[in-house]
Image (cartoon, grey):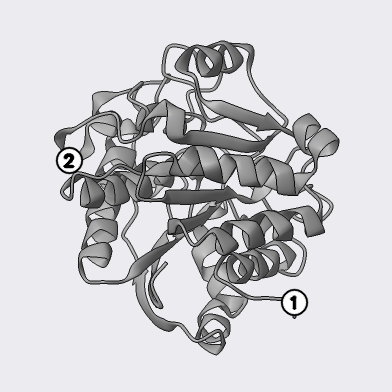
Amino acid sequence: MQRKLRIIGVPLDLGQDRRGVDMGPSAVRVAGIRPRLEKLGYEVKDAGNMDAALAEQKAVGDPHAKYLKEIARSCQKQAEWVKKTLEEGASPLVLGGDHSIAIGTVSGVSAYYREQKKSVGLIWLDAHGDFNTPETTPSGNIHGMPLACLLGSGPKELTDIFGFSPKLAAVNTVLVGVHDLDDEEKRRLREAGVKVFTMRDIDERGMRSVVEEAIAVACNGTEGFCTSLDMDFIDATHAPGVGTPVRGGATYREAHLALEIISDSGSMLSLEVVEVNPVLDEHNRTAELAVELILSALGKKIY
């Protein structure tokens, strides 16, 4: 990551049914993200929030890919913002919104490096696989599909942003901390060849071993990797205000360790944090934790 950062807020909540994640970018800002990054020595520009459609103003559309047109429009615009940020010598710090916005973030990073004939990897910190398609989804919610879209499976409106697909190679894509997968996702992830580290792997091997291997996979033959942090990666006792909470996630210290090791690698190209839901939170605890984890990912040390 460059010492010059640009914060991009994407208040999109159309990718899932539970309302409130559209307020996530504001909650993270209220928790003091900009001054705390500046204290770390970063030059920070806040680009504000992108415009995002409201569910009350739009039709659901295809029940197997709800609000597809609106989400595709937002991801296209977001990808352009991310690509422009990199072209101007800054690194993107993207605040969501639901996890469908990862399509925009990673598409923008991938397009920028593709022009230099380079590829990128991806480390996906999440309780879920997000590897469904309209054909396999049990809910029709697109926040359960972004990783599949980035690897070329899904609606063309989402897979073909900037006119190319896939945005990543499966062999450079790593899921870390998964503890809630649909049966079809399990099958499709295996067939695709995506590296998956479940919470059992973390329990047995420890977070350090898992994240170091994840970095090696994501960096193998690439310029570096994008990091996508869904706050439900962390156990709900520490992060209650998330879109789809699941018990059994990473502990407070495990989450910090994961982001600290990612920072130490020096290979992260972009960072996004998604699924902060102030409506379900307790005194903005989850947004404050998000800020702490962002700081760890960007170099804050205990000593």
In the picture of the structure, the residue carrying the numbered disc 1 is: 302
Q: What element carries label 1?
A: loop
**Rendering coords of residue 123 (x, y %):** 52, 43
Residue 270 image-quadrant placement: bottom left
Query: Residue at horizontal 49%, vertical 13%?
Result: 136
Left or right of 114, for residue 202 = right
**Residue 151 picture location, percent across and down:** 37, 28
Q: Where is residue 80 in the image (x, y as percent from the top left)?
A: 22, 54
Where is residue 170? Give x, y as percent.
43, 27
Location of the C terminus (image quadrant): bottom right
Would residue 243 be visible to someone looking at this image? no
Q: Which mark is residue 7?
A: none
Spatial separation of the CA atoms under disc 2 and disc 1? 41 Å
225 versus 72 height, above or below: below
Question: Which of label 2 and label 1 is nearer to you?
Answer: 1
Compared to 29, does 40 lie above or below? Answer: below
Indicate left or right for 84 with 64 as reference: left
Q: In this view, does 68 lie above or below 236?
A: above
Count of residue discs: 2
Q: In which quarter of the image is residue 86?
A: bottom left
Residue tagged by mark 2?
A: 162
Nearer the observer, 122 or 185: 122
Q: Is residue 16 left or right of residue 102?
A: right
